[in-house]
Amino acid sequence: MRTSLFSLNLLLVIITVLALEDGNARVHVSGIDSSKLKDPLKGRILIEEMNCVSCHNEPVIAKSSKKSPRLLAVGNRLNPDYIRDFLLSPQKVKPGTLMPAMLKHFSIKEREQIANAITHYLVSLNKQDPFKITVPDSVAAEQGEGLFHKVGCVACHSPRDANGKEIMKAKSVPLGPLENKYSHNGLTEFLRRPHTSRPSGRMPDMQLPQQDIEKISHYLLRKIKVPGNLAYMTWRGKVWEGLDGDVQKETAGQTGNFNLESIGKVHHQTAIKYSGFFNVTESGIYTFHLELNGGSLSLGGKKLFSEDPSNRRGTKKFKISAKLDTGPSELELVYFHTGRAPKFILEVEGPGLNKGPIPSKMLTVYNHLIKITKALEPDPALVASGKEHFEKLGCANCHDDLKGKINSYPEMTKLRPGNGCLGEDKNVPRYDLNEDQKKMIISALPKNAVPSLNDKEKIQKTLVQFNCLACHDRTGLGGIDPDRNKYFTGSKPELGNQGRIPPPLTHVGAKLTNSWLTEVIMHGGRQRNYLNTRMPSFREKEVESLVELFGKNDSLEEMSYPKVTNIEESKNAGYEMIGATGLSCIACHDFNGQRSGGAGALELIHVTKRLKKNWFHLYMRNPSRFHPTVIMPSYWPGGQAIRKEILNGKSDLQIEALWNYLSDGERAKNPKGLSRQSLTLKVADETVMCRGRGTAGYRGIGVGYPERISLAFDSEQMALRQIWKGEFAHINHGSFHSRGNERIQFPDGIPFHRLASMDDAWPYKGKTDYLFPQNHGYQYKGYYLNSGKRPTFMYEYGSIKVEDFFKDHLDDNGKAFFTRTVTFSTTVKQEPFFFRLGSGKEIKHNGKSWNIDRLSLSLHEDMKTLIREGDSKDLLLPMHLNKGKTIIKIDYKW
């Protein structure tokens, strides 16, 4: 009976396959449809991409034909069920594939038997680890989704919607449902070294970091389901504020129980969410015993328990009871690993259960049966049969890495159009070609000898075969598909399209040196690091030939260079023009590793290494000729120099001077004004200030004092953020960072607050707290300077006006320290609040001062303070303000 049911199911599957095989799918070769090539050249490309020469020999075409995938380790990479299904119907499993249907002329039963036998044969060849499905990491998959749509994958492959559905299948290199095809290890290894299994290099090496490759693999395989007991996800960060606060997802997977050790080392300030189903075998009252700092428990969609976490306390014990019916009940438990001596205990007792951990057998990730493919154990008889069919069908002609028997077929020059693979013959491979594609191939079939291609056709053919035209335009051939345009992004929006779109290939042979072209094409060399789309590495002879072909066929009018009689004078003129007092090139361009103060355009130091001198002269005279939307200005409009005082205003000498100066490469002296683009601020005998994001958040103010101590004040949260000694600050285009040493960091958050409980978190600005700290009564009012240019910061806390002043001093030993004077002014008596003086792992009272880690803090008056315990301790000063002024003076020594 089971055999009959299996045969019936198989029959239904194959009938479905037959119905779908006659659909509108067709062989897909990127670039053919959108390119403006003539039909014979398109046909030649189809012949080479389908590897027709593997059966129908033709030596000239064989040199550039696509090689078929290597199959020796396919049993390690691919799901055996996928191999079998793909052999049964390649076009159904992967629409657009170049793999022909080899079994179409057999009966339904024979197809299944042959596909099964060949699968056993291919799996038997694997000498590596067997195929194994693993649980995808959903956190890594989220990150992989962004990478897949950003680094260039969707230039060739279809972008996907939120559910993973391909949204541009018709004009994309087909992938099919990869979750049915690969294991995580198999796909990761393929993305890391694609040329190992795909030697023709149509799938390039994207040169991504291993971590990014794994994230993309998790994303593409995220629909894989694996049976298990519990799913989990972890977060790191300020978890005591909950999962909506300043936390980041870290990892996800499956585990067998609620034992923390089962998911590996759990770091402090981690949150874990467990999810699955609690399978109740006997209805009744179930009691859950928990010990934890904070968390929640839900069953069947109802929240049974919730306790806010706090990093100021230890654990608490809870007991929750609920009446549960038999069957699976959806479970979600959130645990916060925070506070003092964190630990997590979950026990249950109920009908038939003594108090103890929940048995793993009562936990499942899914409430239905999950089918999983296991490694195939090759059957020797089927292996032998599969090898025989593999060779008899001619599979070894294409997949020659298996060294099987090669079958003999007519040479290409002897083929008759309309017969064989292009006709209606039954016992031949069936390619999914439409009538237009067949006509293209027929127009390209050699009659006696293969027609030779001219250089232009060779270039066009190679650009189509390697799909270079998906990213690059060459004189109207190719370019980015309008529907894909939004996926090309960059990190420098101020550069416009040039900051996100790969450069055109028009005149590229006249533009780039042969050495740099080789570096770019063969090794993925990059200069435009602001482009998110990566330039991949191809390393194929056909692509390498582009270097010579571009150089041979791309030409522009030849410039005559001026005679330079004094090379040093010329270089000095170039030095003047590059700098801030000349043409100010460094205002937009990076120079010798130092970032510009503006757009951050291409690094100038490599110009003569990358560019041909003739192109440089032409481009400098008229940049918009080569890039109509370029933001680069023309300094020689109409051939006339705008700086008449340099080299007598002669345009050719000025451009030659720039070239000569840049020819020194990394040895070129820094142009004038470069230090102001990446500036180190130094303090002399008066206070120096700077503003910007960085050391003190997004609205920081840096102050360097004459005694060589400095501070960073956060004007957004009105709090001291850092103090340090030595050098003051490094500023760069709207940001500053402390440069000195012996840095003392103060906690994030506002300075004053009314705590309802000592377990409450101290407020600070979160990711979405757009009204913070105004919603706590704060208003920043600016600052004023005294005669020594030392600032007094002004702000309000509710109706309290605050002035905050720092003065640098030297102690008896000549060591610098700060005295801070905080003046509170109020017209009414205020409700008590706390002034947070500092935070640290260790706070010790030492006579009249407190040691907070490396900082010594003392008040000028004897005032009562208290230490709030927690993972990071707080030194709090209770404030009781009466009407009028209250002055607090604090010394900071370190």
Image (cartoon, helix red, strand yellow):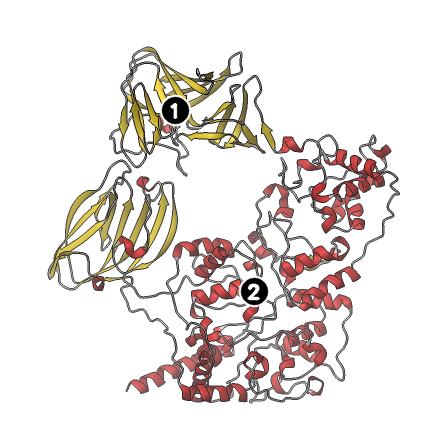
Image height of 531 relative to 586, above or below: below
Give the residue at mark 2: 172
Q: Nearer the viewer, residue 724 or 785?
A: 724
Mark 1: which secondary structure? strand
The location of residue 605, given as percent across then percent down, is 70, 43
The location of residue 212, given as percent across then percent down, is 49, 55
Q: Give the residue drawn at x 39%, y 34%.
A: 765
Q: Give the residue drawn at x 38%, y 18%.
A: 890
The residue furthest top is 884
Give the residue at mark 1: 778
Classify mark 2: residues with Cα within 10 Å, few (<14), some (14-19) or many (20+).
many
Foreground mark, 2 or 1? 1
The image quadrant of residue 182 is bottom left
Image height of 252 relative to 411, above or below: above
Question: Horizontally, is 557 left or right of 860 in the view?
Answer: right
Question: Horizontally, is 597 left or right of 885 in the view?
Answer: right
Q: What is the C-alpha distance between the residues marked 2 and 1? A: 55 Å
Q: Nearer the viewer, residue 350 or 40?
A: 350
Q: Give the residue drawn at x 74%, y 45%.
A: 624
